[in-house]
Amino acid sequence: MDALTDVLESARAATSISCVAEVEGAWSVYARPRPEGVFYLILEGSAWLQIKGEAPCALKTGDAVFLPHGHAHTLSDHPDTPAKPMEDVVQSQTDRGWGVIRCKGTATTRFVCGQVVFARSEAHPLLSVLPTLLRSSSDPAMEAHHVLLGRVVEELTLARVGGEWLLRRLVEILWVDILRAYVGALEAGKGGWLGGLRDPQIARVLGCIHRLPQERWNLQSLAQLAGMSRSAFCLRFAESVGEPPFQYLTQWRMHIATLLLKERGESIGDIALRVGYESEGAFSKAFKRMLGASPAGYRRRFRQQAEGKTTTAVFLPNIEEDEASAS
């Protein structure tokens, strides 16, 4: 298993389609910041995506974009069109089919919107290095992307049994395809550990760290994996990944620890051993230094949040305009 696969497995991205929108004329909707990632698939027509502080991004038929951090944004027919909160658009729509919002008559732009939910962790190495926006490209390697998008259109049109499950899987594949294209286009020294995947020797070390966080890694053993001297390895790793090897190792161990604390009833001491610490005290000290809370406090806070959490069915993402954006 390669390093990116390991991290994708631990991220446990789950996608869901919120709606299909069909719009014409002048239109613009504002989406407030949200904890989940957001995606749009442009099935027909064109649109402009604006993220605060960044230049407008022109989208056309066949484009797919992911906002992994859920930044506030506006989707519109033109950057100058005044935006309305999504709720206002939904309330004014005149026809709703299965998962479809039709704002006016015959649509000139048709797009899918939805969300990507990650197994969030304050120490997750993927989310910390992803940009504000990931989008598909015209690269020949993305040819399969257009085939996948065609399947999305087909499933939405025919609405066959099992279609919702299949749509989620198709979007997840699109997400990984776009992420791989992003990694392939990274310049040397860019993109944090994702950039390190472009270096076969460093990628080998990253893969071993991911698979075996409990190993008693030292500088010599990691350098041997890379087939380099210790000094050359430290320099190459820092240049490729953007941080020293043991800083990255600690981050990965803490990420695995957060997942174990959330999902298992193991003792703190057992978790410490599973992520490479010989004593509970050493693990707790490292955990608190990185995450600002003890392992026991982190687990307690997560359980309290889970017990108080309620779930409700929503047709669209809750993307109302917040006070900060209005000011």
Image (cartoon, helix red, strand yellow):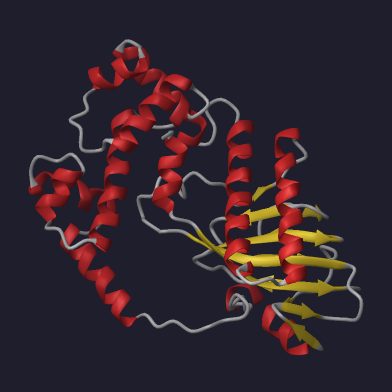
- Residue 313 sits above or below residue 301 on the image: below
User: Which residue occupies the foreground of this view, 314 or 146?
Assistant: 146
Q: Where residue 155 sits in the image (x, y, percent)?
A: 71, 65
Q: Where residue 10 sits in the image (x, y, percent)?
A: 39, 50
Query: Would you say 68 lies left or right of 151 here?
Result: left
Quadrant position of the N terminus in the picture: top left
Locate residue 84: give its quadrant.
bottom right
- Residue 119 sits above or below residue 145 on the image: below
Locate residue 68: give its quadrant.
bottom right
Q: Where residue 76 sits in the image (x, y, percent)?
A: 79, 67
User: Which residue occupies the foreground of this view, 79 or 35?
Assistant: 35
Residue 23 visible in the snapshot: yes
Locate residue 163: give its quadrant.
bottom right
User: Which residue occupies the foreground of this view, 135 or 236?
Assistant: 135
Residue drawn at (40%, 25%) of the image: 204
Query: Would you say 276 lies left or right of 249 here?
Result: left
Residue 327 visible in the snapshot: no
User: Which residue occupies the foreground of this view, 83 or 257?
Assistant: 257
Q: Where residue 268 sits in the image (x, y, percent)?
A: 13, 55
Residue drawn at (28%, 55%) of the image: 258
- Residue 283 sits above or below residue 78 on the image: above
Q: Which residue is most to the front? A: 161
Quadrant position of the C terminus in the picture: bottom right
Residue drawn at (17%, 51%) of the image: 271
Residue drawn at (53%, 36%) of the image: 191
